[in-house]
Image (spheres, rainbow, N blue to C red):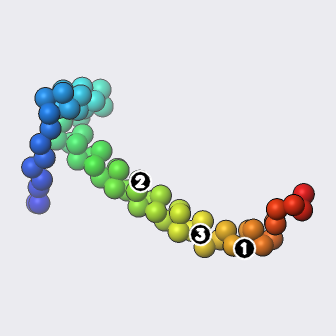
Amino acid sequence: MPALNVEFTEDELTRLRGRAALAGRSLKQHVHDVTVQEADRLAFVEGAVEEAARVLPGVTARFPEGQR
């Protein structure tokens, strides 16, 4: 399985260990999960922005400002 070697400061590593402990996971599993979740979050946001750009012209045409 592919792997990454990521460097952290001592402070960063301490914080990550604390968060992993709170989540009841190993440090390795926590870093994996957080990294994948962030990639998924960014993909969702990018998709939402694209969808908003696609539908916004129709919404503004149907509900122009000033007609309230």
Which residue is located at x 65 percent, y 71 percent?
Answer: 55
Instruction: Estimate the x, y position of residue 17 in percent, counting from the top left.
Output: 20, 29
Amino acid of disc 1: Gly
Q: Which residue corresponds to mark 2? A: 41
Which residue is located at x 75 percent, y 68 percent?
Answer: 60
Q: Which residue corresponds to mark 1? A: 58
Q: Is residue 17 visible?
A: no
User: Which one is earlier in the sequence, the residue at label 2 or at label 3?
Assistant: 2
Amino acid of disc 2: Arg
Amino acid of disc 3: Ala
Q: Mark 1 and mark 3: span between their CA atoms?
A: 10 Å
Q: Mark 2 and mark 3: span between their CA atoms?
A: 18 Å
Element under disc 1: helix
**Pointer 2 and pointer 3: residues touching (CB < 8 Å)?**
no
- Looking at the image, is 19 positioned above or below residue 53? above
Label number found at residue 67: none
Element under disc 3: helix
Please name which of the two marks, 2 or 1, marks the residue nearer to the observer: 1
Q: Which residue corresponds to mark 3? A: 53
Q: Is residue 55 visible?
A: yes
Which residue is located at x 59 percent, y 69 percent?
Answer: 53
- Looking at the image, is 11 positioned above or below residue 6? above
Instruction: Estimate the x, y position of residue 62 in percent, counting from the top left.
Output: 81, 71
User: Which one is earlier in the sequence, the residue at label 1 or at label 3?
Assistant: 3
User: Residue reaching furthest right?
Assistant: 68
Please name which of the two marks, 2 or 3, marks the residue nearer to the observer: 3
Which residue is located at x 12 percent, y 53 percent?
Answer: 4
User: Which one is earlier in the sequence, the residue at label 2 or at label 1?
Assistant: 2
